[in-house]
Every structure is written in C-alpha cells, then in structure tokens.
Amino acid sequence: MKRTLFFALTSLALVGMACAQPPNMTPEMRKRMEAWTKFRDQHKNTQQLSGLVRGMARLQEEGKPLDAKQSKAVVAILEPLSKKPKLTQDDARKTQMALQKTLTAAQLNTISRARTQDRQRMGGGGGNSGGGGARPNGAPGGGNNRPGGAGGGQGRGMMDLDPAKLKDYNPFYTGAKPAASFLERGQNEFKQFLAELKKKAK
C-alpha cells in the first residue's frame, strides 16, 4: 500500500520549508514564519527521528520489510514513546540510535536513498533535517496539487498554530487529539503502522 505515513509527523518541524513565503507578507506573517524556523532549529533531533520512522514504514514498498524480530524490537521502542506527551531532544536522539540498531545495513541504505530522493523532489530542500523533505502530511515537494502542497489549506492550518506552545512536541504521542486535522490524520496513520508491526511481531 502506497503510504504518506504520518507524515504530518514532520509537518510542524518542517513548516518553514513546507510553507514557502508568499509575496507581500505582512509583518505578523513574517514574525510567525521566523518563529516556526526557530522551532524547527530547536527540534532537529525530532525531525531526524521522524524521518527515520517514515523511512522504516517505506521499507515494505522498497522490498526490504522489517521481519518479525525487528518488528517486535521496534514496537518495544515506539510504543512507550506513543504514551509520552513530550519528547525532549535527548530522548529523540536516543530513540533514533535505538531504532537504527534494529535495522540491517541494507535497510539503512535504502532509507538513506529514499530520503535523498525526497529532498531532490523538493528541489534539494531538507538539508540535514532528516525529515526527507516532507511537506505537510508527508507529500513530497514539487506538486501544488498534492496533499499538503504549498499554499494548501493544511499549510494555513499550521501557520495558525503557535510554535511557542509546542516545545518538546512529540509527533508520536497518541494519548490526545492533536490540535489540527492534518496532525490527527498523521496520528491515525502512525497508529496503523504500529498495529501492523505488532501483528507482524506475533
């Protein structure tokens, strides 16, 4: 099944790239964009972790799916994370390292290639963010008609959120309804991914 998995997960972290600056920005809009850029810079480990998990979800499509043992190990890492309202940068870094240890060299290379391709699709964006150049809801860049393309309603929804209230935001938390509909879709897709891993781990 072709996925756009959660990838509202990185929507908040990558909002500075997802929402291209429109012409004739008001001072208020410019201030909000600067706030989101600061947020993104302060949550780089969360971006990298989200990019890794997104890549893991894509392994099935790439012909290198997680086996039962790997799935069990990944569930043991991600399920506790889904119950934590907050995610510090130190915890994000440690979680990323733990997940990487569950993967083979071939799987890690596949994820790396996929993330590079995503960045290339959006014109080289993404830098070292680890987010794979995702736009809101995980759609690759380069197509305004794709879900979450620049200028869409989801982008405006993000800009209505206050990044100052999202310190240590945990995109994997499933214990409460997210503040925006595109994040709720991402949450549901993450739940589905986790359920699939649990099924495979049995």
Image (spheres, rainbow, N blue to C red):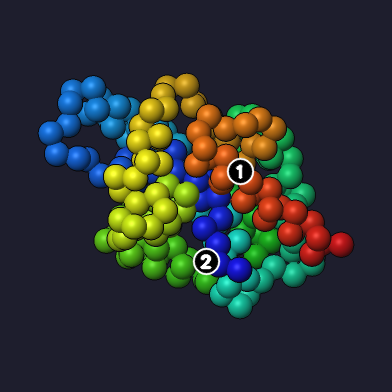
Q: Disc 2 to disc 1, how far (Cα)?
A: 21 Å
Q: Residues within 10 Å of mark 1 (few under 14, many from 20)?
A: many
Rendered image quadrant of residue 61: bottom right
- What is the three-letter code of the residue carrying label 1? Gln
With 61 as the anchor, is 151 left or right in this view? left
Q: Nearer the viewer, mark 2 or mark 1?
A: 1
Number of marks in the image?
Answer: 2
Give me the residue at 67% from left, 55% from top.
193
Residue 180 in percent (x, y) is at: 50, 33
Three-letter code for the amino acid on which mark 2 is drawn: Ile
- Residue 138, how many percent across, how many down? 46, 53
Looking at the image, is mark 2 or mark 1 earlier in the sequence? 2
Res. 62 in view? yes
**SS class, disc 1:** helix
Instruction: Pinpoint residue 12: horizontal percent, then vertical percent.
Output: 44, 38
Which residue is at 74% across, 40% downward?
80
From the viewer's perspective, is residue 59 above or below residue 154? Answer: below
Residue to which mark 2 is pinned? 111
Residue at mark 1 = 187
Up the image or down, 43 lies above or below 121; here it is above
- Numbered disc 2: secondary structure: helix
